[in-house]
Image: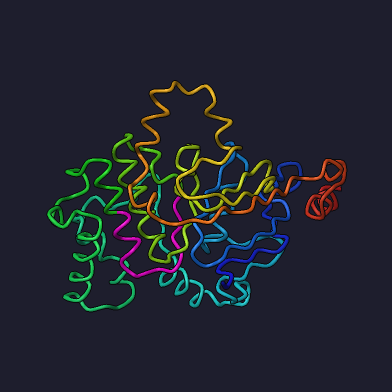
Amino acid sequence: MSNVIKLEEVSRIYGFGNATTVALDEISLSVEKGEFVAIMGPSGSGKSSLLNIIGLLDKPTHGTYHLSSRLVSKLRPGRLAKARRDHIGFIFQSFNLLPKLTALDNVALPLAYKGVSLSKRLQQASLALERVGLQEREYFFPKSLSGGQAQRVAIARALVNNPSLIIADEPTGNLDSHSSRVVMELLAELHSTGSTVLMVTHNPELTRYATRVLYMLDGSIVYDEETKLGEVPARARASTDGMPKDDESEALESVSAFLHEIPAKPAPIRKRLVNNTKKSKMSKSKRKVKKVTQ
């Protein structure tokens, strides 16, 4: 398989002088086509900063980023916007639907920016809504939709351009358990058709849908584990050890049936723990920061 994403020693530094913050600290990461990667970690660990760079919403301070073998730093602003529009679908926790547009018009909006004719973009938007089970809500405004329905409209909008990469930032964060299952099964369906999915989540149970889990801390990836579909990896499960049995049984039932039908070979576990001696050394990016503040 080819790498869709390749980061090499990427750092992201915000602020100047004493107000400097290292959001990402020399991260190296490769993601192959067709992977479903869940990203976990406490608030402030760098998860959103990582997604912003991968999604071409931000640029690294240091390091290189290749998207589908193209060096992102060499892309002009117009090419960058085109790559973001045509190849990446975004799903946000807050849905980000325009309140004065119907569900159909919200989904069709990316096609309008692409220059697709009105009749064709409405037709494609209708098909995308049908795909997420909301064709009968085409002419509803966001305020008339439930949270789960609004997120499914947002997923349809992310899919309408047939992107090769789906980036989901806490896609179930504002949803109840039933709506969360529906959204995750939609993401699992996309993954099963060959899409590459990157998802930030605080919920260990959602790692059942992933084929790989990254754990972040203080701007670094401290652990990287390949997993089997339908199983919560051991490290993620540790955070649910105190879960009552009834809740655990409910979590098991939440996995979509087709996940059990997909044959999966036992995947090797890659543990890339941060060397204890690394913490005693100042990283390149931090040395650069020190020079600025002196």
Q: Position of residue 88 (x, y in %)?
A: 44, 65
Q: Position of residue 44 (x, y in %)?
A: 60, 39
Q: Is residue 161 magenta?
A: yes
Q: Looking at the image, which is closer to me, 221 or 265?
A: 265
Q: Is residue 54 magenta?
A: no
The residue that appears at 48% across and 23% down in the rendered structure is 243
Query: Which portion, as a residue range, is magenta?
Result: 154-168
Q: Does 80 sit above or below residue 165?
A: below
Q: Position of residue 150 (x, y in %)?
A: 26, 47
Q: Looking at the image, which is closer to me, 15 or 27?
A: 27
The residue that appears at 33% across and 75% down in the rendered structure is 114
Lateral position of residue 281 relative to residue 141, left or right: right
The residue that appears at 25% across and 56% down in the rendered structure is 132
Quarter holding the N terminus? bottom right
Q: Position of residue 148 (x, y in %)?
A: 27, 43
Lateral position of residue 236 relative to residue 275, left or right: left
Lateral position of residue 289 relative to residue 40, left or right: right
The residue that appears at 67% across and 54% down in the rendered structure is 12
